[in-house]
Image (cartoon, helix red, strand yellow):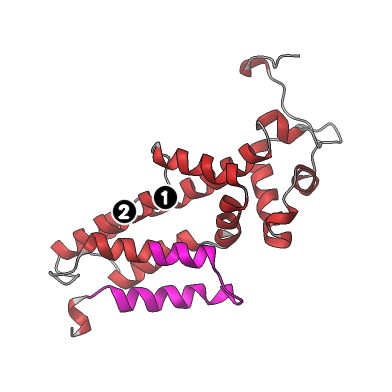
Amino acid sequence: MSRPPDGDREEPMSPRGVAIPDVRERLFAAAERVLAREGTAGLTNRSVTEEAGCAKGLLYNHFTDLDDFVAQLVLDRFARIAAEVEPLPDRAGTGTVHENLTVAALAMLGANGPAIAAAAVSRNEVARRVAWSWADGAPGPGAVEDAMARYLQAEQRLGRVAPDADCPMLALALTGTVHHLLMHPGPQPQDGPALIRRLVTALVPTPDDGR
């Protein structure tokens, strides 16, 4: 049976017959909880829909298959991160350079960042779909790196970053290290924020550093 046109499609229903608002986000949030609790091995259609409190067939009403669902989850979460970091260049001249960069890097790390990053590479097809989408311009780590580079260049023009600093390379080093922490959070992932602060301070020269 073919699906009805979007305008005629009924709201998805929970097992109790109550319409579920914003079903994609509900499923994504449920998947994040499953990932945090059980890791990528526990991420299945059943575990996600049970966590979301909806019918088992609901996921396949909105996504082609589980690979499509996981890829869309990863892309959605990275798009949110990119949108959060995008205004960073507008903060040039406010606060401190190190704190502004730390906040941006921590947005990329995120509370569920390691679990989402692990999901991105846990299935070959998911990794391929995510990589293709990023290559086609979907917001991802590249957008974060670009925002950081533009921010550093803006601060450099204001004299708050050393004039000989290579801003694009600093941005690459920051995002690359955060990516490493996402993929290899270590036994104590809560140490991530402290590591990010140390990294920013060590990498980014400012006139007040006495370098």
Kindly give the residue lying farthest to the front in the view shown: 124
Which image quarter is the N terminus in? Answer: top right
Q: Verify CB contact (< 8 Å) between mark 2 and mark 1.
A: yes
The quarter of the picture where residue 27 lies is top right
- The stretch of residues the image draws in magenta is 176-205
Does residue 47 sit above or below 167 in this rendering?
A: above
**Going 36% across and 66% down the picture, which residue do you hit?**
174
Horizontal and vertical percent position of residue 34: 72, 55
User: Where residue 147 is drawn, which disc sits there?
Assistant: 2
Amino acid found under the numbered disc labelled 1: Ala
Kindly give the residue lying farthest to the bottom in the view shown: 210
Which image quarter is the C terminus in? Answer: bottom left
**Going 65% across and 32% down the picture, which residue do you hit?**
63
Does residue 123 sit above or below 205 in this rendering?
A: above
Query: Can the viewer see residue 92 in this picture?
Result: no
The secondary element bearing badge 1 is classed as helix
Horizontal and vertical percent position of residue 86: 35, 50
Amino acid found under the numbered disc labelled 2: Ala
Residue at the disc numbered 1: 82
The first of marks 2 and 1 along the sequence is 1
| Magenta stretch: includes residue 50 | no
**Going 62% across and 52% down the picture, which residue do you hit?**
122
Front residue of this view, candidates 195 and 25: 195
